[in-house]
Image (cartoon, rainbow, N blue to C red):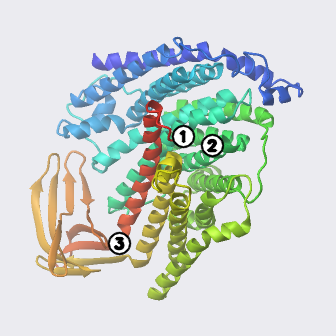
Amino acid sequence: MIAEFGHFALILILALGTCQAVLFCPALFRASYRALGPTPAMAPAIASGSLPDGMTGTTGPAETSGFGVWPLPFAMCVLAIIAEAALIHSFIVSDFTLPVVAGYSHSSTPLIYRIGAAFIPDSGAMLFWVATTTLATLLFALQSVARGVTEQDRVALGILGIVVALLAAAAIIDADPFMRSGMAPLDGSGLDPELQDIAGMVRGPILYAGLAGLSVIFAVTFAALPGAKLDRAWSEQLRPWAMVSWTFLGGAIAISAYRAYTEQAWGNWWYWDTSENALLLPWLLTTAFVHCRAVLEKTDTLKPWTALLALSAFGAGWFGTFLVRSDLLGPLPTALLSSGDSVALLVGFCVLFAAAYFMFWRCAGGMIDNKDFSLISRESGMFLNSVMLSVAAATVLIGTIYPLFLRWFDGDIITVGPPFFVQALIPIGLPLLFLMGFAPTLRWRNDEAWQIGRRMKLAVMMSLIVILFVWMRFINASPLPLLGIGLAAWVFTAALGDLWERLWRQPDHGEGKYRNLQLLGPRYLSMTFAHIGIAILIAGGSASAIWEQQISLSARTGQSIQIGPYNLQYEGVALLPGENFATRKATFIVYRNAQPVAELFPEVRYYPIRGIETKEADIWHGRDGDLHVSVGERAEDGGRVVTVRFLPMMPWVWGGMLLMLIGGAISICTRIVLRYKKNGVPAS
């Protein structure tokens, strides 16, 4: 009965989303009719926002109460919570009459994994996406009430209603999580062992939270297109949503990278498969949007390009989700059987974004930039930055879908792997890192080349010194990692140099130099943390590529293995039972300078429910780097196959990702605090 309540709640979400669209979108239809009409004389009026009330969808007085705005989003959010709770309850009690529970759970599965399994299958993931989108809709409604509800806010809520309705319809049609089977099995198939990981379970919810934020950006942008009202108020309204989406998507990428790193079968921290690329695409476009949105807010320029990025970021996330769910890029027999499972999601994508891009095409001419800027300016630097990020996203998309097109036309099955992406993205990434170093130091509107050289001389000298030092120490190293380390030093020293300039070379306002840190504002601090994080990430990845060491051998009990500055002593293997698996757990004692510093316990697990054997590597994050140890089967000589990898500076990669997320969190949390504490500190 609980599942039926969840199913009914999901149907009501579809109905209420449709009602919200019908109630709030008439203004969009009127404005669209005027904006898409064949009279060119309307374009100047649209651009100036001087159309009569109800035609642009933006003008008109703001409401003070906003009572008619929030009830429908609130009802949808409550219903989504009920539906999600019903699905989680079905997994907890092992209700195997639901095929989704029977396919992803078992009575012996630990409780924490049964709860997490509710978000892993396609049906569970779609339901959570619906839930997060309804929550984002409610939060946007409350934000609109706090700011004063305008006609444009109502149109945006109508578009969000369309998004919620399309997602709910896709969840019901493509993979209904509450569909019951005629005959329930005695027990379930169990969760895939590779998915029995806490980090992997939270990655999906974090991803869909980021996509929910992008849906708000998409809706507000769509609503502003007919009246060409992409102004500073629009940019200010979307600032928290941009940072929340960017941070959540970055968190999902960091979790995916760490899971790839800890899986011995993958052997690296980014595998460039479809699920990872589906994360990278919206994050790259959201990063580009964050930069252009800041330019628009500051100088009221780059309106068409910013609007296009706002629409495309959500489109990339939606399309990437479809690619992952449909399995079109998997083996051909499997793809032919499962590609129709996401037809509603694909139809919704085509309808929604065809309308959005058509509206953009017809209205882009009315988005007139009222101010100019020179080639040497911060606006130009951030614009070029966004263009290169967009080109990188297009490259990743082409590499991801190229096998699909080749299969359709020639019937050939190929795999596009890391070599293609690395070689294609290096010509884009290197100039992007170079631009990242000095773009934040440029002045708005206009700057002088000689002043840029004066400000960047320390960064130039430090990056050259780092490159020469590393090259002299490792003269036979590949030039690309050396260049990566040099550019990382360039970005790092440029960010710190600009921070030093602003902190200690600005007036102290009579309250001491450290007052300048408070006056910088969260946006600048967030940007600095993110740029420093990227520099540390690039330096760690490049250094690991140069200095990585790997040993594979047949080890016997008591044998020592020397790698890098560490000595590992193999203590043997013990057979132990797990909660729902049996394991052969090996023990290694790690020594440095003849002193024990850690113990590692790699395993080989066997899951009898699925009949699958997995290798679980163990990793020690030391001050010199990561020690990555895994064990395999017995070798022919009676020993145990052991693989040890030493990756110097690999913790820098995770530290860099963490700093980037901290930068986003600083911007989000400071905005929340300053919203309720007016202490005079600028929000930007």
Dot 1: within a 10 Å radius of its alpha carbon, few (fewer than 14), some, or many (20 or more) residues? Answer: many
Q: Horizontal placement of 27 versus 325: left or right? A: right
* Image point (79%, 31%), residue name: 47
Q: Are marks 1 and 2 in contact (CB under 8 Å)?
A: yes
State which tag comes first along the sequence, 1 or 2.
1
Identify which amino acid the numbered label 1 is placed on.
Ala
Label 2, secondary structure: give it: helix
Q: Nearer the viewer, residue 287 or 296?
A: 296
Identify which amino acid the numbered label 3 is placed on.
Leu
Q: Nearer the viewer, residue 269 or 103?
A: 269
Residue bearing the label numbered 2: 293
Q: Horizontal placement of 358 versus 670: left or right? A: right
- Disc 3 to disc 1, C-alpha distance: 35 Å
Q: Horizontal placement of 218 versus 583: left or right? A: right
Is label 3 or label 1 in front? 1
Q: Are marks 2 and 3 in contact (CB under 8 Å)?
A: no
Q: Quadrant of residue 299?
A: top right
Q: Which image quarter holds the N terminus?
A: top left
In the image, residue 511 sits, relative to residue 441, either above or below, namely above
Image x and y of residue 286, in percent = 56, 45
Residue bearing the label numbered 3: 647
Identify which amino acid the numbered label 2 is placed on.
Arg
Residue bearing the label numbered 1: 242
Dot 2: within a 10 Å radius of its alpha carbon, few (fewer than 14), some, or many (20 or more) residues? Answer: many
